[in-house]
Image: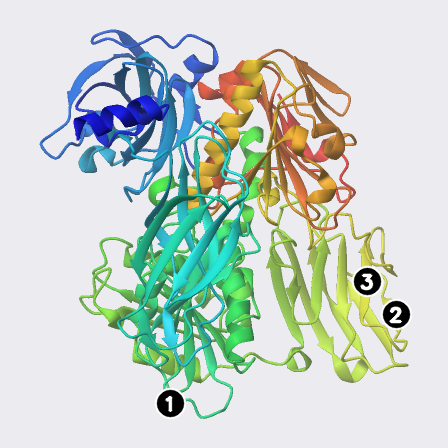
Amino acid sequence: MRKILLLLALLLPGYGLFAQQTYVFKEGLISGPCHQYGRTALFTDQLAWALCNGELKTPVKGATSFPDEKGAQQQWQDITANAEGSFAGRVINNGYLYVSYNAPKAQTAILNVAGHQMVYVNGTPHAGDMYRYGWMYIPVQLHQGNNEFYIRTGRSFGRQGIKARLLFPEKPVYISIADSTMPFVVAGNNNSDMWGAVVVVNTSAQALKSMQIQATVNGKTVTTAIPEVAALSTRKVGFKFDASGAANEGYNCTLVLNNQKNTIDSKTFALTAVTNKDHYSNTFVSDIDGSVQYYAVTPQSNPDGKAPAFFLSVHGAEVQAINQASAYRYKDWGVLVAPTNRRPRGFNWEDWGRLDALEVLNIGINSFHPDPERIYLTGHSMGGHGTWYLGATYAGKWAAIAPCSGYPTLMGYGSADGLIPDSPRNSTEQVLLRASNPSNTFKLATNYKAGGVYILHGDSDKVVSVDYARQMKKILADFQKDYSYYEYPGGEHWYGDTCVDWGPLFQYFKWHTIPADTSVNEIDFTTANPAISATHHWVRILQQQHALEYSRIQLSRNKSRDAITGTTSNIETLAIDLKDVPVGNTLSITLDSKAAVTYTRKAGDSLLYLHNGAQWTAGAAPTATDKGPARNGTFKEAFNHRMVFVYSTAGQPAENEWSLNKARYDAETWYYRGNGAVDIVADKDFDAAKYPDRGIIIYGNASTNKAWKQLLQGAPVQVTRGKVTVGKQEYAGEGLAAYFMWPRADSKTASVAVIAGTGLAGMRAADANQYFAGGSGFPDYMIFNVDLLKGNTAAVKTAGFYNNEWQLDEKEMIRN
């Protein structure tokens, strides 16, 4: 055997790199607290500041580290892993854990850390595993000699601890099924065209191209070409399979990864099979990023051929969608569907969690063809928050909502990513926090008037206090005529399936239907962003006067007189649906005590567009490329529409290295938080025409990224080596960073997001990616320097929102 191994080592270059072995980190140094990240564009990180400025020195015991929140100097301390292999204790909260590995030669390895926010590996950022799932396997390049790992810790991590190890796998490329996304095989359903997803790990220095997965179930093989997997990265890839027909001994799926010539790896695993009367999971390809996601179903019992009611149930933190659905008994009058929020923690049902809920809602409606008047929303814990949030955001979509054991906003209950600040401390925070306004259900609360509200909460809940339910009851009492409230005696946070599958709650649902638009004559609707929510029955808020401030419309309609009266706030353009106005009739609209607008309906007219100026006037629809419901800005909006990450190759070697590493870091974070995957493309290979209507994320600046000219030539924000210009204002230096977005000129829906720096220091200052935290607010543009990392808000040089024509507006920005 030793001769065989020696022969392989001689014949196969790098064979020794992939010998199966594990190195567990047991000794390290710790210092902290020294950073603060959360749900805003502002953050503090003393170690990252030192790294940006080239001042980070290899720590030794007793050496000076970073000042704490009060300015007192701290030191590096010894720390040893406990018997379970965890670095634990209060000392690691909100700090950095330093460990090292002395590699005998340059080689690749798999870093597996559980319980951390992120890690710098020899100065390169990599994504964290803050929820301790344990399946973050990140390929890293080790150099010969000492390799340094700075592991960022967070709140409460001291109790749970952090585990860290290096793995040296047997194969440079392999399939991991530890984090697979698979549907159930449901007897009685069409199982011939199904989607699954597994992780492909690429520890090699070359991108994997022209690869495919062959999936075999019951002797039927389906081949799927998989997208490119970047060098030194992992990617969750989707594949199709055919599970039709009866299985003799259960359903097994065999996957073969090949390059169309040779087999690279294979895995076999069991599929879950159920009847069509059981709870089950199904999968779909998401329009957010093209990845495979799943939802769970509690099917209707004893369907009678009539259109069923439809219940959308949003789960709590750490709850899988299939477990959420399984908590409900089968209903003879409706079907229940549970989306995933992209992960059990995901995005708190905000941002991409909100989009996931809408995708699954639409899939459920198209699949089960429910009664359109009987659509309901409920959820527990974080899903209770999701119910409050989605219920307020999409007023009119639900006949009734039922938050269970939930908190209303991320301002009062922040979970792992912290709180959204409830008030700004200065003008800089004021404009930055505007981007979080869509999360504030208190400001949207009057939208609950559109349907019924049932509040259920245990009176002994120590996780999410019953005080949140009492707070919302008090708010509703001021205006809501239709709500019910029940505190379950002795109920803790989870008191069994009863705390979601509560009989009186569903009886309350039965009493409620969504009114037809023709029967709604009173409108009271608020939105903070028309691209999130614009429509309420027969009125649409299309454009705002001030982006991301609250826009409200209160209307009263007298159909017999063809008259509408009311008030508006922060609305530039709105539209009235004319389907209830007979052709030839003249509609009179009086808004804000201004002169009435009269309009005689013509055949073929469907919407009346009203523009706000000195007077309200009727006019044409806004230009499709202007801000509006299809695209309204904020930096985060571009991370959608099957986004593509484009890194630079035209800069200096260190600049290009940063660009690629940052793109991989964001891809890792997106995978972890959003169960997602993205294409990572070099600028020299990017052609906008090949990626129509897709969100594009640019890493670098106009001097380093060749794709800049294609997409950003007309943008009012320009970043080059050593300089940022915002309109006529110029900022100079190597330590400036920028987050900004710009609409794609060749698309009516997609945008470009830019993560840029004027030099290496500025680029590294842009490494933070808390924009993936649910509810975190980022305006259209934000320019800052490295001193932001030391907590200096004045380091934000400028930030703000474009106007509706995508132009800079002095009234919508701050300057420091």
Instruction: Locate residue 507: give its quadrant.
Output: bottom left
Instruction: Locate residue 149: give its quadrant.
Output: top left
In this rendering, would 447 be left or right of 815? left
Please state, as top left, top right, bottom left or bottom right, where the N terminus lies in the image: top left
Alpha carbon separation for disc pair 2 and 1: 53 Å
Residue 649, percent from left and from top: 62, 22
Q: Amino acid at mark 1?
A: Asn
- Asked if residue 620 is positioned above or below residue 668 in the image, the reply reads below
**Label 2 crowding class (10 Å Cα cut-off): few <14, some 14-19, many 20+?**
some
Element under disc 3: strand
Q: Amino acid at mark 2?
A: Thr
In this rendering, would 525 be left or right of 308? right
* Labels 3, 1: front one: 1
Residue bearing the label numbered 3: 609
Residue bearing the label numbered 2: 598
Q: Which mark is residue 302?
A: 1
Element under disc 1: loop
Depth check: 359 or 489 in front?
A: 359
Alpha carbon separation for disc pair 3 and 2: 12 Å
